[in-house]
Amino acid sequence: MTDASIIERSLREADWFSMIFDRYFPVIHRYVAARLGPSAADDVAAETFLAAFDQRHRYDLAFDDARAWLYGIATNLIGRHRRGEIRLYRALSRTAAPDDVAGHADRVAERVSAERLSPELARGLAALSKGDRDALLLVACAQLSYAEVARALNIPIGTVGSRINRARRRLRTTLGPTAREVIDHG
């Protein structure tokens, strides 16, 4: 059963929305934890689904997959916690040990996880604009396509490409040549 059909059915029978929660809470929670840290993840992920439930009548049923919509809601809620996110990245840039990152070279998502950032990457992420950071982390952490990021952020796909390219360019400058693999292939 598609997400769109579940959401449509939930308009008549609210209990059906629990299927969307069960299907996507773990990935939304991981994304929020990567952005804000584990202490805020439970609350913000729960807020995401509460907002989605309240807004389900506005969901575009032409899209079978609700992931981009949910990531968009989560990203907007993260924006409200943005100062906390930037404080976290700045704190990690002062306290994280560079050795913490070396064991996590296999996956970009792990490299940008709020708990495992190198000081340089944390500093670089804190310096990005909100729009650039949101686009980059939706691709890196949530593994969304550019089209899905465009839908999640309600921006043109060309803007997604521009934001990601700008973010990668700035991170390359901040991190130097060792970051090329993480940034360019993430």
Image (cartoon, rainbow, N blue to C red):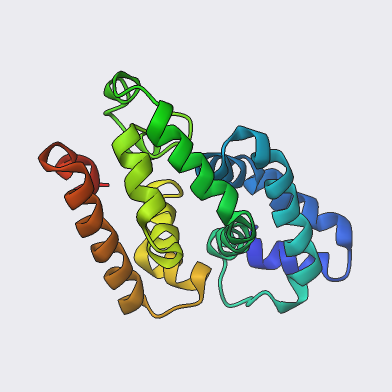
Q: Nearer the viewer, residue 40 or 142?
A: 40
Residue lying at the far left in this picture: please name it. Answer: 177
Q: Is residue 174 above or below residue 153?
A: above
**Does residue 4 appear left or right of residue 85 in this picture?**
right
Picture coordinates of residue 71, whole percent (x, y): 56, 58
Q: Is residue 133 above or below residue 39?
A: below
Q: Nearer the viewer, residue 29 or 84?
A: 84
**Does residue 76 appear left or right of residue 90 in this picture?**
right
The residue shown at (58%, 77%) is: 62
The residue shown at (45%, 63%) is: 130
Tell me if I can see residue 87 in this picture: yes
**Quadrant where the N terminus lies?**
bottom right
Q: What count of labels does the image hold? A: 0
The residue shown at (51%, 76%) is: 154
Q: Nearer the viewer, residue 154 or 82?
A: 82
Picture coordinates of residue 176, whole percent (x, y): 14, 43
